[in-house]
Image (cartoon, rainbow, N blue to C red):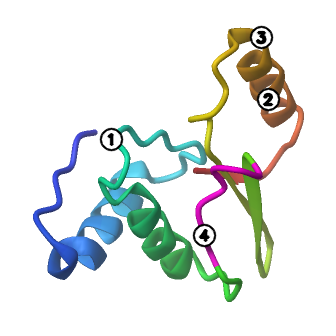
Amino acid sequence: MKFEVAGLAELESTAKKILQEAKEEKIFLFYGGMGAGKTTLINKLCELLGTKDHTSSPTFSIVNEYELEDGSIYHFDFYRLKNQMKLLIWVMKIIFILGIIVL
């Protein structure tokens, strides 16, 4: 899927389209430069998925967890992981966690 968002006014409708088209998918990957709005879009997705938690960029923590009524959302930011082995370890950890949403 590829979506382009021209401004904040389109954010909620784009987030809804992503969730509708994703159906049962639980892993989402977002690509874009620094300041492109990835975290802002992810914040809206988290809101639509039902989290009441404060959402923010996990650039320094690498992962943030947001609670849902029936599970959790794990928001990863691999920007700082320059080493492919570190990335592989994180991906392996994701694989071993079942029933989660990964952004």
Q: Name the residue under label 2.
A: 90
Cα gap from disc 2 to disc 3, whole angstroms: 9 Å
Rendered view: 92 above or below 71: above
Label drawn at residue 85? 3
Residue shown at 78% from the left, 81% from the top: 69
Q: Which amino acid does label 2 sit on?
A: Trp
Mark 3 / mark 4, whichever is N-terminal:
4
Q: Name the residue under label 4.
A: 56
Was residue 72 drawn as part of the magenta stretch in this picture?
A: no
Q: Name the residue under label 1.
A: 33
Going by the image, does 94 lie left or right of 41?
Answer: right
The furthest residue to the left: 6
**Of residues 35 and 63, which is closer to you in this image?**
35
Which residues fall within the magenta stretch?
A: 55-61
Q: Is mark 4 on a helix, strand or loop?
A: loop
Q: What residue type is labelled 4?
A: Ser
Mark 2 / mark 1, whichever is N-terminal:
1
Going by the image, does 35 lie left or right of 65?
Answer: left
